[in-house]
Image (tube, rainbow, N blue to C red):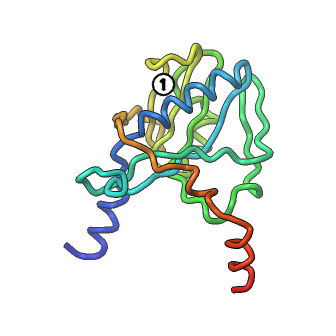
């Protein structure tokens, strides 16, 4: 297998982690009656103990300054960190309609999978769509997510060491 084949295969989205979907459903409900919005990020399946190549959606990045109301959520593109490699997006439709609006389709260019969650935000109230707005399958995968506390597991001595270079 060539390098290009490996890169293409590793970018395949295998599904969304169960905990990540639960977080999105709960966040959508908490934001009601306003829309909820975030960007989807992934982890290599092998890092999650799966014996497959590809990515599992494990994180949702909420961009500071996102403005939301009952009919839309707007992200200031200048607030999106440059290093964000979004697999797609997730947002809610408080009206319960689980299909992309024309405005949604205009924003679906960033990433390859877009999740819409509709009120009342139950486990069955979501669907995934491709960048063209066609419904697509997205498996829910029961994997243990990396411990997020490790990300913040550093001391002042670690910071001082890093600053000294």
Q: Check the picture and name the quadrant holding the N terminus.
A: bottom left
Q: In the rendered view, tell whether residue 135 sits above or below residue 154.
A: above
For the point 38% across and 57% down, which residue is it?
A: 44
Q: Up-down: is 83 above or below 48?
A: below
In the rendered image, the vertical position of residue 62 relative to residue 95, given as above or below: below
- At 34% from the left and 67% from the top, the residue drawn is 7
Residue 57: image x %, image y %? 45, 45
Whether residue 26 sits left or right of residue 70 in the image: it is left
**Which type of secondary structure does the marked residue at label 1 adopt?**
strand
In the image, residue 164 lies at what x, y percent? 73, 85
Q: Position of residue 158 (x, y in %)?
A: 67, 72
Q: Which residue is outermost to the left?
A: 1
Residue at figure coordinates x 39%, y 47% from the top left: 56
Tell me where residue 105 sits by quadrant. top right
| Left or right position of 138 against 81 | left
Residue with the mark numbered 1: 126
Q: Report the quarter where the C terminus lies.
A: bottom right
Q: Where residue 107 sits in the image (x, y, percent)? A: 61, 44
């Amino acid at each position: 297998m060539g390098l290009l084949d490996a890169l293409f295969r590793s970018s395949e989205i295998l599904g969304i982690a169960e905990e990540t979907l639960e977080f999105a459903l709960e966040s959508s409900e908490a934001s009601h009656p306003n829309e909820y919005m975030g960007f989807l990020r992934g982890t290599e399946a092998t890092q999650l103990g799966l014996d497959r190549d590809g990515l599992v959606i494990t994180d949702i990045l909420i961009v500071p300054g996102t403005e939301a109301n009952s009919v839309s959520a707007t992200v200031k593109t200048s607030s999106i960190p440059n290093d964000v490699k979004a697999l797609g997006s997730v947002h809610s439709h408080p009206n319960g309609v689980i299909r992309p609006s024309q405005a949604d389709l205009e924003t679906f260019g960033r990433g390859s999978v877009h999740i819409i969650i509709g009120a009342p935000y139950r486990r069955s109230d979501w669907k995934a769509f491709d960048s063209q707005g066609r419904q697509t399958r997205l498996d829910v995968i029961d994997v243990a997510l990396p411990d997020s506390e490790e990300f913040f597991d550093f001391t002042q001595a670690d910071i001082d060491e890093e600053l000294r270079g």
